[in-house]
Image: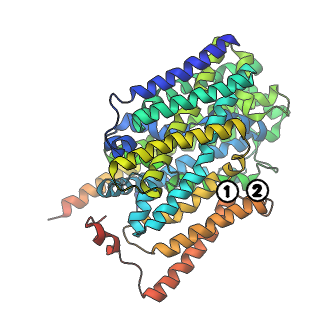
Amino acid sequence: MTTTLIFTFAGIALIGVLGFLGRRRPAADLAEWTVGGRRFGAVTMWFLQAGEVFTTFTFLGLSGLAFSGGVAAMYALPYIPVAYVMLFFVARRVWSMGKARGYLTQGDFLEDRYGSRLLGTVGAVIGVVFVLPYLQLQITGLGLIVRLVTGDATSGTLSMVIGCLLVIAFVLWAGLRGVAATSYFKDAIMLIVLGVLIFTIPAHFAGGITAMFHKVAQLQPGALTIHSGSNDLTWFITSMLSSAIGVAFITLPHSWPAIMSAKDPKVLRRNYTWLPLYELCLMFPMVVGFAAILVLPKKTSSNGVLLTLSQRALPPWATGFVVVAAIATAMVPAAGILVGISSLVARNIARVRNERGQFWVNHGTVVVACGLALLLGIFRPDLLANLLLLTYSGLAQLAPANGLGFLRRKLVGRWPVLAGIVVGIGVVIYLTFVEPARFGTFNVGLIGLAANLVVLALGAVIERAVVGRAPAATDVVAATGVPV
Amino acid sequence: MRLYHVIPAIPALALVLMPFLPFVNTDSLWLGLPRMMVWGGAWCVLLTLALLAAESLMASQHAAEDGDRP
């Protein structure tokens, strides 16, 4: 246990140091801090974009999902490549608009495209509220990892505190460049660890990968199909579509700084072409989850199966590497989320006019948001757990606004879009907390999206009847003089 | 919709339809692996090839359009 603990804290410290190395001097302004001056090349962009995909959920959650739901875990494989097909075609336009009009956040985009500060603020508030639980998930995940391998709750809490302090420090110092610097390390160690685990764990417990799946086919054939239960076919397809819509329409606020930081739209398109191959790594933790089906009792906590099997199959020093990889998948995405949240608050919610003030509000938000997530993670880990159910479903409600904003022609004005978002969010909240069983395993985000689109369409009809025409594309252009 | 839109749509559709295909969503194995994993993995690889083809088609079409301009 001591060896693992030494590796754990050394790993946390190393990630913090790497984050600081992302920048030699502190950033001079918010654009430099948030999007690295829009100068990131192909390699950095690759790790930034891939970094959004590989989180604690990927590392621990997917093996757990494979353990509890078998191939239902495969829902996580197709949605990102499917979303990349759309991003392949729209990324150039989004990047060009961002460069021409100086967008740093999703709120900037909505405000500019619809000529509405209110819509920009609403989009930003939704982004912050629905992503905060996701931030807490990363921090709680960090504590869980350490607690699982050491069996000591105090070590888990201490690791959360140290991890948060280091993330705050390197994010304040280096901004998105710190996230990029740590992303290299995170993906490298994660791939090495998963590459080792995918062979050693099936070999140790079942005589190899194919032997393991033959045993699963004999003993638990249901794990190889999508079948009835909480992870049934309806859950699979609707969860996949909801997540794909969220990614394809760039509704996650921390995706915006990554896209805006590219030095060239060709870099984005090249990454969207090749990243589907990288997504194949998502199947590695799933294989570990299948091994757990054969080895662990059904009542085992699903999130811990990867670490439990690693401890049983590997020596302590090797388990230490697994823990460092798992910690990296918590700390690095947490840093990226902080960059996304803080820039939304500074640019679209607090709306401080002078640049220096905006910079300080941004940095204050980093400290407050991470501190809040840490305190809730320690004292009330279940408080935001319910809100987490809303993260993807809630953010998906911004998809129509973003999608219509991508178009050259402005088809609809601010009010129908705003009404659609409000109704969509209301439906998602109602179905999540008041009547969660109403539609069974159907993803509530899609139901909210349907209501959102109906209201938006009705609003557009009313708008045309009242105004007499669709809002002209030049309504916004005239304000800035930059056509997009 | 142009050809370079259609080509990557094919693997995307194959991925979305994965759980509905009875010969994929079954407890038999392909190459010693669950069929869903083999199908999903193969179409991810083909998606990259389709996007490369789409990029090439777009580039040649834009070059042709630029050549037509006076």
Residue at 51 percent of width and 54 percent of height: A248
Residue A444 in sight: yes
Residue at 36 percent of width and 37 percent of height: A42
* Residue placed most toward the observer, B1 or A133: A133
Residue at 69 percent of width and 57 percent of height: A443
Q: Secondary structure at mark 2?
A: loop
**Dot 2, crowdedness within 10 Å: few (<14), some or many (≥20)?**
some
Three-letter code for the amino acid on which mark 2 is drawn: Thr
* Residue placed most toward the observer, A226 or A87: A87
The picture quadrant where one finds residue A327 is top right
**Disc 2 versus disc 1: distance between alpha carbons?**
8 Å
Label number found at residue A238: 1
Question: In the displayed structure, does residue A156 sit left or right of residue A362?
Answer: right
* Residue placed most toward the observer, A432 or A363: A363
Q: Report the label total.
A: 2
- Chain letter behind tag 1: A
From the viewer's perspective, is residue A208 above or below residue A338?
above
Q: Which residue is mark 2?
A: A441
Q: Are marks 2 and 1 in contact (CB under 8 Å)?
A: yes
Question: In the displayed structure, does residue A358 sit left or right of residue A393?
Answer: left
The picture quadrant where one finds residue B1 is bottom left
From the viewer's perspective, is residue A272 above or below residue B33?
below
**Dot 1, crowdedness within 10 Å: few (<14), some or many (≥20)?**
some
How far across and down, in percent of the image, does residue A370 sit? 56, 39
